[in-house]
Image (cartoon, rainbow, N blue to C red):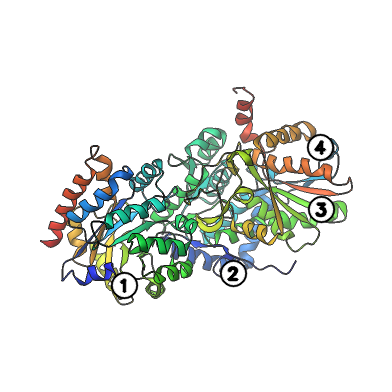
Amino acid sequence: MHPYDLPDAQGHFGRYGGVYVAETLMSALDELTREYARYKNDPEFLAEYQNELKHYVGRPSPIYHARRLSEACGGAQIYLKREDLNHTGAHKINNAIGQALLAKRMGKKRVIAETGAGQHGVATATVAARYGMECVVYMGAEDVKRQAPNVFRMKLLGATVVPVESGSKTLKDALNEAMRDWVTNVDSTFYILGTAAGPHPYPMLVRDFVSVIGEESKVQMPEMIGRQPDAVVACVGGGSNAIGMFHPYIPVEGVRLIGVEAGGDGLETGRHAAPLSAGRPGVLHGARSYLMQDANGQIIETHSVSAGLDYPGVGPEHSYLKDIGRAEYVAVTDAEALTAFHDLCRYEGIIPALESSHALAYAAKLAPTLGKDQVILVNLSGRGDKDINTVAGLAGITL
Amino acid sequence: MNRIDRCFAELAGRKALIPFITAGDPEPGQTVAMMHALVAGGANVIELGVPFSDPMADGPVIQRASERALAHGVGLRDVLAMVAQFRADDDATPVVLMGYLNPVEAMGYAEFAKAARAAGVDGLLTVDCPPEEAEALSLALHAEQLAPIYLIAPTTPAERLSGIARHARGYVYYVSLKGVTGAANLDVTEVARRVAEIRQHIQLPIGVGFGIRDGQTARQVADVSDAVVIGSRLVQAVEAAAPGEAAATLQTLLRDIRAALDA
């Protein structure tokens, strides 16, 4: 793999990415690009970020050999990068801290965020409390119902949670509403975008803040097994945990990068959230990328058991990695993800997030096709405490 | 000379009145009649909204209009058919489509531009396509004599204006306040200052929109600009109108604003 230095100055990853926003936001995005360029190599900024990751988040997160799960799958050894052990329970905090530190330096006293499963909302509410900022989180009304524990956590942390009633009432509509807030309050407000999508510079800066996942893995795997894994596997909604794992591995030859999308009821039913597997390129939420859309260019409603993957678009860098063939993208169904969820609970004593369960489900399919001496590293992007109501509900149990 | 340039050339000191409605709202069968009603009420240019599933830059009023139109399955090709039907009886009033980029992308820039010209469309305003990303779209539009219409915001720094000037044709549209469509509070002094600044960089008529709700605010804005754009107020009236009354309601509302502009 040749050296990789994307996006370009205009935010493009090949034909993807860019800045497709209303004129009102252009100067704010320019400002953010300038400020980020100023701080990304600033020793003081980086030292503060590293210090927060170590003492507040609890990094580095361990890598764990899931021996019983590997044995049950019958094939390759499955290792888990334990982002679920981070403070707030997912990889989202790595990004939220990075952006909040930028916001602090830019003198913004108010932060806003969109959230799907609530993990990014919780991470943002957490850092807002930590740094004494006002926080408003937009969340689809449907997701507010699905993720009640996270809604309450955000409120405990002092955030205002605004249920969004427009459109499909899920993550994409929360993003629309956050953009509307930002257009209106652009002078006072920093938008902490939760995934490696949206207009430039977000896909780049989110990627940079979550790349700590892959950077640590690249050091930890050789320490544990004497080499890099044969494949890394991560779930893809907007794609932040996946790009955080993939990006440091892009130049590492021999490591397959596999992104797992939400197949919902199955790709053949059309009821899914898998734009890379079954969509086509278009423009939404500030960037060109693969999208779920109809023939008229209208965005299609998505379906997934996992609120965090229930999104019709994907970060532009994933679209680029797909087209150049450096990463593979597959989909697993709700049912497969749920099986993987229960398997990890029972074989390893770890309750995974439903999002991460998609990556586990594909690893379980891949493992038997590989030899026992081969290694799959799964990014266990979040813990499943927030999902117990959903999983109980699917089993007909009311908690 | 295309219809937009001719329209502004023939104003002879009057101010242009540019109403916005969403195509297909409240239902597709009424749109053409509503367009004629706008002209009868004193419109000089019609901005016709192309419904989109994710109208990020619009407030609740125009979001709901989009949702009503989409419930009837109205897509970009349907909107072009409405313009063609309008043209059967009105070959003079310029029609500008306003919406988001993805429906145009899905159709293809060149195919859209050809079909739009054939239908009698005069310009296109894509809210989420700033000049930085507009090279290919502008080329396709210019090739068919369609005017790319650009928004300029209160947050637009002077150094961006020349980039906008390079692509823009017809007129430019100054968004008189930060926020989504349908927001309140208009600072006319600030609008006057910005319009004067824009004139130093862009040699096109300047329309002002966002926050214009009645004849009085329209008149204040017209005093410092070339054209007044009014959208959410009209869409709100369409929403509130009794079944079948949308066209008549629009005509009455617009006639009052026209009178205030010409007084």
Q: Are marks 4 and 2 in contact (CB under 8 Å)?
A: no
- What distance separates the C-alpha of mark 2 from that of mark 3? 30 Å
The local crowd at label 4, few if under 14, some if 14 to 19, many if 20 or more residues have their Cα within 10 Å, is many
Same chain for marks 1 and 2? no
Residue flagged by tag 1: what amino acid is it? Ile
Residue A297: percent from left, percent from top:
48, 52
Q: Which mark is residue B198?
A: 1
- What distance separates the C-alpha of mark 3 from that of mark 4? 17 Å
Residue A316: percent from left, percent from top:
59, 58
Which quarter of the figure has residue B11? bottom left
Which residue is painted at 66% across and 50% down in the image?
A241
| Residue A185 visible within the image | no
Chain to which the residue tagged by mark 1 belongs: B
Same chain for marks 1 and 4? no
Q: Are marks 2 and 3 in contact (CB under 8 Å)?
A: no
Q: Is residue A264 left or right of residue B87?
A: right
Sequence-wise, which precedes: disc 2 or disc 3? 2
Which residue is label 2 attached to? A8
Q: Is residue B208 left or right of residue A349?
A: left
Which residue is label 4 attached to? A69
Q: Secondary structure at mark 3?
A: loop
Q: Which mark is residue A229?
A: 3
